[in-house]
């Protein structure tokens, strides 16, 4: 289905603002539209006073001024519309500012490879270090970023991301939630309440999502008390590759087919929507089906407050900032820090 022009222009503007400038040909390739279409969109955005046109190049009117080394600045790069990382950013900022550093936030638009030009530009402008959480929707996206990240001329710390062991980024500092342990707590809580048939409805478009899915399989296979378990997508847009036909059954349908008495949902919003769908299908939460959310951003706000795994978002941000400060001071070897999440037990889980 063709993307609406308004949404396409919004993405163009986000990409240009994030990078400072972009070539029309590059934008056309990223958006998978013709150069003529991008030129028309750029012309409209220029008429609206939102960007500046050049010969084959589009420039932002809102790009931050170049950084100077004396600014003592550290850059943070996170994906667009990623509320989960907001608390991590605040944790990192507090730690950096306490150390006398200036924290500068850059938002990577939702186009493939958006982080690289942003990172390379701000490094060239004089930033002293980089905290980054690449979107990495697929494993291929992740692998494609390893070499250029390793080649940056400033200290880099991955925030809420851990590279593949043995990769060129293996010795890069990183701070991340221990998501395996988060899934362990969710499953252990449900098993302790007597649940023996479980469903995981998870996303499949981020490193966190992939970790949760593999952890669920490993943990359930190792628990002899669990009689049956299954995995499906938590939402229609949860798959990393929209060109792959969705053959995953809807969550409610899977719960019925497995005769599951409990479901774990990634993320909170999808968990809240599942509760509505279950109620509409005559399956009461938690009387007929207990629900555990993963994220704990809005989990307490449901009509039935959701039990949730709460990643230590601010702590991860602080840990990432401390790793970067240590690297700038040339202290010690690179480290991987895994911070344990906690389980917030609320009204959506009961014994069976």
Image: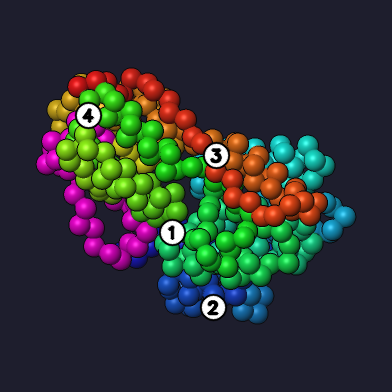
Label 1: few (<14), some (14–19) or many (≥20) C-alpha neighbours in 10 Å = some
Q: Nearer the viewer, mark 2 or mark 3?
A: 3
Position of residue 64 relative to residue 252, above or below, is below
| 106 relative position to 200: left or right | right
Asked if the residue at tag 1 contacts the one at tag 3, i.e. Cβ–Cβ closer than 8 Å, the answer is no
Q: Which residue is identified by label 4?
A: 195
Q: Main secondary structure of the magenta part?
A: loop
- Residue assigned mark 3: 339
Q: Nearer the viewer, residue 325 or 51?
A: 325
Q: Which residue in the structure is indicated by mark 1?
A: 137
Residue 1 lies in the magenta-colored region: no
Hey, which quadrant is residue 64 in on the image? bottom right
Q: Mark on residue 25?
A: 2
SS assignment at label 2: helix
| Scheme of image coloration | rainbow
Q: Disc 2 vs disc 1: which is toward the camera?
A: 1
Q: How far, Cα to Cα, is label 2 from label 1?
A: 23 Å
The crowding category of the residue bearing disc 4, from other C-alpha atoms within 10 Å (few below 14, some 14 to 19, many at least 20), is: many
Specify which label sits upstream in the sequence, 3 or 1: 1
Mark 3–mark 1 Cα distance, whole angstroms, equals 22 Å
Screen quadrant of the N terminus? bottom left
Residue 18 seen from this side? no
Is residue 332 visible in the rendered structure shown here? yes
Q: Which residues are magenta?
A: 235-263
């Amino acid at each position: 289905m063709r993307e609406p022009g308004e949404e396409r222009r919004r993405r163009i503007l986000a990409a240009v603002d994030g990078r400072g400038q972009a070539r029309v040909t590059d934008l056309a390739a990223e958006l998978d539209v013709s150069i003529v279409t991008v030129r028309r969109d750029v012309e409209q955005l220029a008429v609206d006073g939102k960007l500046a046109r050049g010969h084959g190049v589009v420039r932002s009117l809102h790009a931050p001024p170049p950084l100077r080394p004396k600014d003592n600045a550290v850059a943070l790069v996170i994906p667009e519309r990623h509320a989960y990382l907001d608390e991590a950013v605040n944790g990192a900022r507090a730690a950096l500012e306490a150390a006398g550093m200036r924290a500068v936030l850059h938002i990577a638009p939702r186009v493939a490879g958006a982080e690289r030009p942003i990172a390379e530009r701000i490094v060239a402008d004089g930033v002293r270090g980089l905290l980054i959480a690449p979107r990495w929707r697929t494993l291929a996206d992740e692998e494609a970023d390893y070499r250029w990240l390793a080649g940056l001329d400033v200290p880099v710390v991955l925030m809420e991301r851990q590279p593949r062991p043995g990769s060129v980024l293996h010795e890069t500092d990183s701070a991340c939630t221990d998501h395996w342990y988060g899934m362990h707590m969710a499953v252990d809580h449900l098993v302790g309440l007597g649940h023996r048939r479980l469903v995981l409805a998870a996303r499949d478009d981020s490193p966190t999502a992939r970790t949760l899915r593999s952890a669920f399989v490993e943990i359930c296979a190792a628990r002899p008390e669990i009689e049956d378990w299954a995995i499906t997508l938590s939402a229609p847009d949860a798959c990393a590759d929209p060109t792959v036909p969705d053959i995953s059954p809807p969550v409610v349908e899977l719960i019925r087919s497995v005769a599951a008495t409990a479901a774990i949902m990634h993320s909170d919003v999808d968990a809240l929507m599942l509760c509505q769908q279950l109620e509409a299908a005559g399956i009461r939460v938690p009387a007929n089906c207990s629900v555990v959310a993963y994220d704990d951003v809005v989990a307490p706000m449901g009509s039935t407050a959701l039990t949730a795994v709460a990643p230590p978002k601010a702590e991860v941000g602080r840990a990432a900032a401390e790793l970067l400060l240590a690297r700038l001071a040339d202290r010690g070897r690179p480290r991987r820090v895994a911070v344990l999440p906690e389980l917030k037990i609320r009204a959506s889980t009961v014994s069976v």
